[in-house]
Amino acid sequence: MNTSRIDRVLAAMQAHGLRQMIVSDPQSIGYLTGVYVEPFERLFALYLSADGAHRFFLNRLFTVPETPIEAVWFTDTDDSIAQIAAVVRPGEPLGIDKEWPARFLLPLMERLPGTPFRLASDCVDGVRARKDEAEQALMRENSAINDEVMRRTAAYLKEGMTEQEGAAYILAQYQALGCEGPSFPPIVSFGANAADPHHMPDGTRLRAGDCIVLDIGGKKDGYCSDMTRTYFCKSADPRHAAIHDLVRRANEAAEALVRPGVPLCDLDKAARDLIADAGYGAYFTHRLGHFIGRTDHEQGDVSSANTAVAEPGMVFSIEPGVYLPGEFGVRVEDLVLVTADGCEVLNRVDKHWSVIG
């Protein structure tokens, strides 16, 4: 159990006027207790209380040899909702995590008719957003591995290969480098397919002159990496190369602003204004970035709507893009770690366009 993380969550709960909360996100439970379980359809929950009377609700199917918090065990045929209701202090506001299925939440609400229920996932997600030193080290290590996979993939791809062949190679490299697997299915997009930011690899073959978008990430020791680079096969159309330069400059402009206290919306604006001023604003169709850690997309984003400020320990992506339907697309993405006086760019692979294949 990580008592410092739990203490930070309890402090956040107090700031939100809460003295009790149910955490149900398996990644958040793993973050706080060191116990990660994929529960599938079964109940899996951690009850946190300001008085320290925490409880861990576990199905006997789960192979958890030791529990750092007092466990309440149940089977598939037990009334686990009644067990939770017996622990909750009735009438006192109860914080609820963001993704607890209705099949658990609604019966608990029926059991506790006088208890106010409050959405409280920010109490945990806000703590997860600010990585401690151990987490920062893992993010650095995983980003270095991701850099190596990107370099290997750029050297491997050749004219005539399919996107699916490229994706299979990427997955093999993560395994070879000791990762548990990818942090998300790799995006390998050739030519016009790259105009779809989330195109999934298919049988399209790489042709001379095509752009190549590689959006990849691995997962190791429970933490994720993510980056994007865009290359060209054999040669680069001058217009496409100029757009690539534009997107790279937008990436660099936003990264140059990252420091504690800067509103995240200002980072989005810096990149978006540069692209819009060049006439491609309508083709930058997504937010600038997302938070990352135990999952590839954690709570929090870098967008025009997010006025929250950057804080030391936050890790998020900076990934502007331009997507011209039916023609091509380009995206340049790094992960950045907010430091005490600026930021550390976690990816080292050259962002300038280059010709491969």
Image: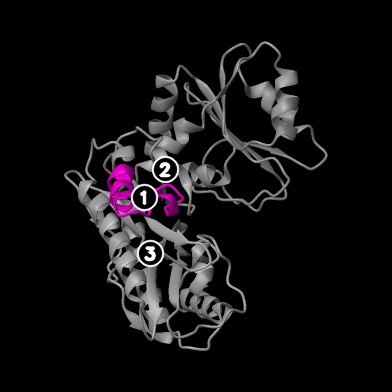
| Mark sitting earlier along the chain (2/3) | 3
Mark 2 or 3, which is nearer the eye? 2
**Residue drawn at the location 25% of the way across and 59% of the way down:** 249
| Mark sitting earlier along the chain (3/1) | 3
| Mark sitting earlier along the chain (2/1) | 2
Quadrant position of residue 261: top left
Left or right: 151 with respect to 255? Answer: right
Specify the principal SS of the magenta part: helix
Residue 115: x %, y % from top left: 64, 14
Rounded to the nearest angstrom, the CA distance separating label 3 from label 1 is 14 Å
Residue 264: x %, y % from top left: 32, 39
- Magenta-highlighted residues: 267-289
In the image, what residue type sits under mark 3? Asn
Mark 3 or 1, which is nearer the eye? 1
Residue 274 lies within the magenta run: yes
**Residue drawn at the location 41% of the way across and 87% of the way down:** 357
In the image, what residue type sits under mark 1? Phe
Give the residue at mark 3.
142
Give the residue at mark 2.
301
Instruction: Categorize mark 3 by other alpha carbons within 10 Å: few (<14), some (14-19), many (20+).
Output: many
**Residue drawn at the location 38% of the way across and 32% of the way down:** 8
Residue 197: x %, y % from top left: 50, 60
Q: Nearer the viewer, residue 126 or 265?
A: 265
Q: Nearer the viewer, residue 267 or 92?
A: 267
Whether residue 145 is visible to the viewer of this picture, yes or no, is: no
Secondary structure at badge 2 equals strand
Secondary structure at badge 3 equals helix
Whether residue 256 is visible to the viewer of this picture, yes or no, is: yes
Contact? badges 3 and 1 (CB < 8 Å): no
Left or right: 108 with respect to 116? Answer: right
